[in-house]
Image (cartoon, rainbow, N blue to C red):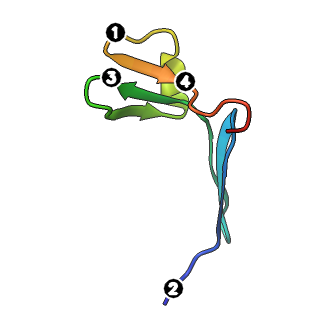
Amino acid sequence: MLSKRIAIDLGTANSLVWLAGKGMIVNEPTVVAVRIDDGQVIEVGNAAKDMLGKTPGNIRASRPMREGG
C-alpha cells in the first residue's frame, strides 16, 4: 500500500497544502464562489477572490472561515 505524507492548513486567510518530497503545492486564499440556487462551487482560491464584490445575484463569493473557524 502506498501512502503519502500530506499536511493541510485551512486558514482564515490562506489554505495551504504541503506534500512530502514536493513541499508546498497549494497556497491560495480561503475564498469560495458558490451558485446560490443549487450550491455548486464555481471557483475557489485566487479565482474566487477576484470575484469578491463583483458577482451577479445568483453567485456568492465569500470567505467561509472567520476568526479561526
**Image depth: mark 4 or mark 1 in front:** 1
Q: Is residue 49 left or right of residue 10?
A: left
Taking the view exactly as shown, the residue that stands out farthest to the left is 38
**Tag shown at residue 36:** 3
Does 13 sit above or below residue 1?
above
**Tag shown at residue 2:** 2
The alpha-carbon separation of the residues under discs 1 and 3 comes to: 8 Å
Look at mark 1 in the image and give the residue it sits on: 57
**Image depth: mark 3 or mark 2 in front:** 3
Q: Is residue 53 left or right of residue 23?
A: left
The alpha-carbon separation of the residues under discs 4 and 1 comes to: 17 Å
Asked which quadrant contains residue 68, the reply is: top right
Q: Residues within 10 Å of mark 2 (few under 14, many from 20)?
A: few
Closer to the chain start, of discs 1 and 3, is: 3
The alpha-carbon separation of the residues under discs 3 and 2 comes to: 39 Å
Does 56 sit above or below residue 32?
above
Q: Residues within 10 Å of mark 3 (few under 14, many from 20)?
A: few
Q: Secondary structure at mark 3?
A: loop
- Locate residue 47, reporting x and y percent: 48, 28
Q: Nearer the viewer, residue 57 or 43?
A: 57
Look at mark 4 in the image and give the residue it sits on: 49
